[in-house]
Structure formats: C-alpha cells, structure tokens
Image: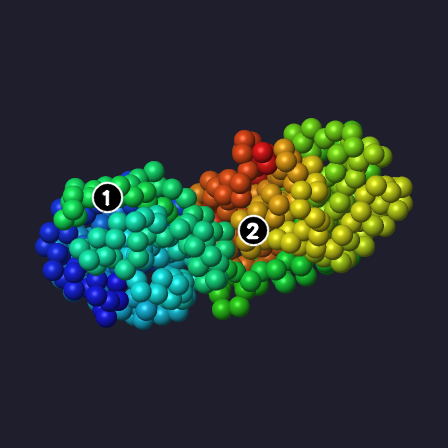
C-alpha cells in the first residue's frame, strides 16, 4: 500500500500478529495459483508489491534470481526480514505504491497479493507496476472478488470491497497489458474473525495475469511481405531460425531456435491446389486434419498467407460452401488471389484484415482455422475473443500453433527474427489454452502436432487446438 494510504497505519498496528491473521484470511494455495500464472524462470528478477510480512516472497525466492519486496509499512517489512532470513536474494523497500523505487522496464514479473483493494486508485497502481516491467514481462494480481462486507472498510482498512473481474480486465488493457487472464484460484478469503455484528467472511479470490506489450507487428509484416515476394519459406526448413536484429533497446539472443517445421500434409491434401500455394507453406501443422469440414460450410482462415489451407478447405466444403482467407500482408493477398484465379476457386475470397479485428459480421462463420499465425500476434486473447465473435453457435475453432514447453525470459521474446520465425511470440502451452477458454470456448482439446525443437534450451513444439462455441 502507499505510505499515505490509511491502510498503512492499520498494517503497522497489526504487523506482529499478521502472520496468524493472514492464515485465517487466505492460504498458500492462493500463492501457488499466482506463481502458476507467471511461468517463472530461474534467472528472473521479480517484485512483490504490498509484500507485507513476506507471504508471496517466500514462494518466489526459491524460484527466481532476485525478489524485491515493497511495502508502505515499515513494521511489516521488519517482520518480513525475520521471516525470510534464510534467503539471500531479497531486497526490501519502504515504498509508495504510486512511486515504486525501481527503474523503468527493469523486472521480468511483478506480483501483488491482496494489495489492490487497499489502493485508492487501482488503475494508477496497475500502471505503476506495469512501468517497472520489461516488454514481455508479466503482472500477476491476486485479490478478492466483489463483495458486500462493508464492515471490512472500518475494521481492516479496506478501501475497496473487492473487484468485478471484468473491471480488472479493463484496467489491465487500459494499462497496456495483453493476453489478459482473469480466473478463479479455487480459494476463498475465509476469515476466522468476524465483524462486531457476527458477520463471517467467505469471499472468492481471483488471479489476474497479463503481459506487457511487445510492438512486433511491423517487423512480422515486413518479413512476411518479403517471403511472399521472394517465394521462400523458412518454416518449411529444418533449423531455419538464426540470430537477428533485436527490437529497439534490447540485445539479440545467441540462438533463437532450432526447430524442425513440418506441415503434416499428405500428397492427397494438396491435390488440385495451385502449385504457387501447394509449394508455399509457412505452417507448423495441418489445421484441417481434425476440422471435419462439411459441404456448404463457411470457413475462415486467420493468416491465410499463400492460400494453401484455404484451397484445401474449399475442396472440402464444395461449391455451395465459402472460404474466407484473412491476411494483414498485401503481398500475401496478391499471391493468394493469383493462385485462386489460376485454380478457378471462385468460392474463395481473400480479404485484408487483422486477426484481432476480422472483417466479417458476428456469428457468420462455421469453422475458423489458422496455421502457425496466432503466435505472431501480440494479443492472443483478443484474437480468440474475435474468433468467438465471428463463429456461429456450435461453430468450431481448429488451429495449429507453436507453444513452449517451459518458461522463458522476456528477453527471448524481443528478437525480430524470432517473431518472424514463429518462435518469440509463442506462449507456454497452458497459457495458450487458458486464453482459448477465457474467450468463451468449450470442449477445448489439445493434440501434439508435427513440428518440434528447442529455443534457448526450452522445448518448443506445435499443437492442434480444437474448441467449440456452444
């Protein structure tokens, strides 16, 4: 909490008893839920804002290189020093929550547990925490859902009676965070104390996670325009990714990735497809393998590129069906349109657009496919929400994409070449699936696909994700 916040006086008063009080309010499972959303790496530098007596830091310290503990109560920090004396990788700060004494873009992750409801201006507090995050760094907040226990304001110096989850999402997005997930922890704030009127507390606790934006779109678009004009296909070759220029203000990695890219198409899949498209694939799998396309369906291909998947889909839905390819790169659209004209695919249309804003009406599509494209977008959560909007009831999502099998540092996300090669924009598999579910999809299933390798020592591979809009 901020030093000027009235909550600071309350915590100075209860610091000596806080550990006993805290155990009645929330359990270690809350901390575990927060850490699970952070995908921590041993070399990370992180902060625990509103750290109190070190509850969150105790779980973080064994997992990362360094933890900064920041709190507005000197008494709480004194107890934290005693509680965490066994750890040598901690730094303590008496801090105003709206003026954290850490440099811009200096940390890989920031945590705030049961802190935000003590902040008079939650959005300003979120913006300040976001300021100290590196691009690609993650903010994780755990706090109470909205409730009506007014007595907590007087007896526990709470400023807010919890929060609506949609409000947290809005604040995160306003602060510049992407891939926002607001989910339940499965825990409740169950106080052993009660108000003077005997009212007990039983309030569910959420976890909100988001990532500081990386501006990579221009680099990706330029790279794919060059491929469309040159006819090369890096992702169809083995170990194709090499060091490249970093995004502004960061260094390049020694190794971006060593990946064996494999589309998984059979010769029969490409029968009847114009050679310009059949021989030009930038995918990491075959999203049509499990799509079960039927005659007369409308299919939308996000990031249609040279048109291979769109043309295969067109053969399956037949002349009574329709296929819409959407791509952000004009050179790719020109290439695909030439192939469509040459092959006589009159029921395939290629449109300029972005994955985050598809150029189709609500509930107008039966199936959405995508092949190694969503990883290239900065806000995958927004892409999945847009796909959900465009699909009809019982519509299906079938995407192949690249994911990580472990945690990586934000620095690994900052190579222009890495983004263009479908690596730096990849998410941990669980985070990717969480974003699909957050968009509203049901019956989500994941299958390991055909491409695999390593990136900076971490497994990276393609998956096929299937889901339904019920």
**Residue 357 in sight from this viewpoint:** yes
Q: Residue furthest left?
A: 16
Q: CA distance from mark 2 to mark 1?
A: 35 Å
At mark 1, the secondary structure is loop
Left or right: 41 with respect to 216? left
Element type where label 2 sits in the image: helix
- 322 or 252, which is in the foreground? 322
Instruction: Tell me the number on the disc at residue 201.
Output: 1
Residue displayed at 15% across by 52% down: 18
* Residue that appears at 83% across and 50% down: 337
Question: Could you tell whether 16 is left or right of 330 in the image?
Answer: left
Q: Residue at x 81, y 52 (%)?
A: 335
Closer to the eye: label 2 or 1: 1
Above/below status of 296 relative to 106 = above
Q: Which mark is residue 382?
A: 2
Left or right, 115 with reference to 285: left
Mark 2 or mark 1: which comes first in sequence?
1
Q: Position of residue 83 (x, y in %)?
A: 15, 52
Viewer-closest of 57 and 325: 325
Quarter of the rendering containing residue 465:
top right
Q: Position of residue 200 (x, y in %)?
A: 21, 42
The x, y position of residue 287, in whole percent, is 66, 36
Q: Residue 140 in the image: x percent, y percent? A: 37, 52
Q: With 273 as the anchor, is 381 left or right in this view?
A: left
Q: Nearer the viewer, residue 143 or 286?
A: 143
The reply to whether residue 409 is visible in this rendering is no
Colour mode? rainbow
Q: Residue at x 14, y 62 (%)?
A: 12
């Amino acid at each position: 909490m901020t030093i000027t916040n009235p909550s600071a006086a309350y915590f100075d008063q209860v610091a000596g008893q806080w550990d006993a009080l805290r155990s009645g309010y929330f359990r270690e499972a809350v901390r575990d839920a927060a850490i699970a959303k952070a995908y921590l790496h041993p070399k990370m530098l992180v902060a625990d804002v509103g750290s109190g007596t070190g509850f969150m830091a105790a779980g973080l310290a064994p997992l990362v290189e360094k933890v900064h503990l920041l709190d507005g109560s000197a008494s709480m920090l004194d107890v934290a020093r005693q509680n965490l004396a066994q750890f040598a990788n901690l730094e303590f700060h008496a801090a105003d929550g709206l003026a954290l004494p850490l440099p811009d873009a200096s940390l890989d992750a920031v945590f705030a547990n049961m802190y935000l409801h003590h902040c008079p201006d939650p959005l300003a507090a979120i913006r300040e925490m976001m300021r100290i995050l590196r691009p690609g760094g993650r903010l994780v907040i755990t706090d109470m859902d909205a409730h009506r226990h007014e007595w907590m304001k007087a007896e526990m110096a709470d400023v807010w009676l919890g929060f609506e989850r949609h409000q947290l999402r809005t604040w995160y997005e306003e602060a510049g965070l992407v891939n926002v997930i607001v989910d339940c922890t499965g825990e409740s704030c169950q106080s052993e104390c009660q108000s003077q009127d005997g009212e007990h507390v039983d309030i569910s606790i959420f976890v909100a996670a988001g990532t500081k934006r990386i501006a990579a779109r221009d680099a990706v678009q330029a790279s794919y325009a060059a491929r469309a004009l040159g006819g090369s296909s890096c992702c169809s070759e083995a170990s194709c990714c090499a060091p490249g220029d970093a995004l502004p203000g960061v260094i390049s990695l020694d190794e971006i990735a060593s990946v064996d890219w494999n589309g998984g198409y059979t010769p029969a899949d490409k029968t009847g497809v114009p050679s310009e498209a059949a021989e030009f694939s930038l995918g990491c799998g075959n999203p049509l393998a499990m799509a079960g396309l039927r005659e007369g369906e409308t299919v939308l291909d996000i990031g249609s590129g040279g048109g291979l998947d769109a043309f295969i889909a067109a053969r399956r839905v037949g002349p009574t069906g329709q296929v819409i390819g959407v791509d952000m790169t004009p050179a790719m659209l020109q290439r695909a349109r030439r192939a469509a004209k040459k092959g006589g695919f009159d029921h395939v249309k290629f449109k300029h657009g972005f994955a985050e804003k598809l150029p189709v009406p609500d509930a107008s599509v039966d199936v959405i496919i995508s092949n190694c494209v969503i990883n290239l977008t900065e806000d995958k959560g927004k892409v999945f929400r847009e796909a959900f909007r465009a699909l009809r009831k019982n519509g299906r999502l079938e995407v192949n994409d690249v994911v990580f099998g472990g945690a990586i540092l934000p620095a690994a996300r900052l190579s222009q070449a890495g983004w263009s090669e479908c690596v730096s924009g990849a998410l941990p598999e669980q985070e990717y699936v969480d974003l699909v579910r957050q968009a509203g999809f049901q019956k989500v299933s994941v299958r390991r696909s055909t491409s695999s390798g390593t990136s900076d020592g971490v497994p990276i591979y393609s998956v096929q994700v299937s889901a339904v809009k019920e």
